[in-house]
Amino acid sequence: MLEYVKTILQKVSFNAYLFERELKKGMRYLMPTELEEFKDWCYATFGMSHQPILNRYFRPAY
């Protein structure tokens, strides 16, 4: 499922609204063990273009 969610995000990354919607949906489908890898991938891939959205969904652990 992780690879599927990654593929969808890459396809909708041109639009911030679609990106946020698909990110939220994708996180529901992932196993808790996959979320950390997914977070790292999201920041590496979309950190420059969608960082405010990513920060809303991946709060830093203090």
Image (spheres, rainbow, N blue to C red):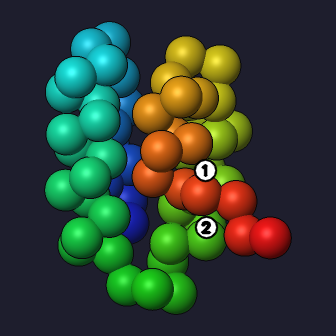
Percent x, y of residue 32:
45, 86
Residue contact at pointers 2 and 1, CB within 8 angstroms = yes
Percent x, y of residue 47:
64, 30
19 and 11: which is toward the camera: 19
Q: Residue at x 61, y 71 (%)?
A: 36
* 16 shown above or below 61: above
Q: In this view, does 29 lie to the left or right of 10?
A: left
Q: Which residue is drawn at 48% across and 45% down?
A: 56
Mark drawn on residue 21: none
Mark drawn on residue 41: 1
Percent x, y of residue 25:
19, 56
Q: Quadrant of the N terminus?
A: bottom left
Q: Is residue 25 left or right of residue 33?
A: left
Q: Residue at x 53, y 28 (%)?
A: 52
* 45 shown above or below 28: above
Judging by the rendered image, the residue that carries numbered circle 2 is 37
Query: Helix, strand, or loop for circle 2?
Result: helix
Real-space CA distance between mark 2 and mark 1, rounded to the nearest whole angstrom = 6 Å
Amino acid tagged 2: Glu
The quadrant where residue 28 appears: bottom left
Q: Which residue lies furthest to the front in this view?
A: 62
25 and 62: which is toward the camera: 62
Q: Which residue is drawn at 31% across and 47% down?
A: 23
Density class for disc 2 (Cα within 10 Å; few <14, some 14-19, many ≥20) is few
Query: Helix, strand, or loop for circle 1?
Result: helix
Q: Is residue 56 left or right of residue 15?
A: right
Amino acid tagged 1: Trp
Q: Residue 49, can we see it?
A: yes
Density class for disc 1 (Cα within 10 Å; few <14, some 14-19, many ≥20) is few
Q: Which residue lies furthest to the top in this view?
A: 14
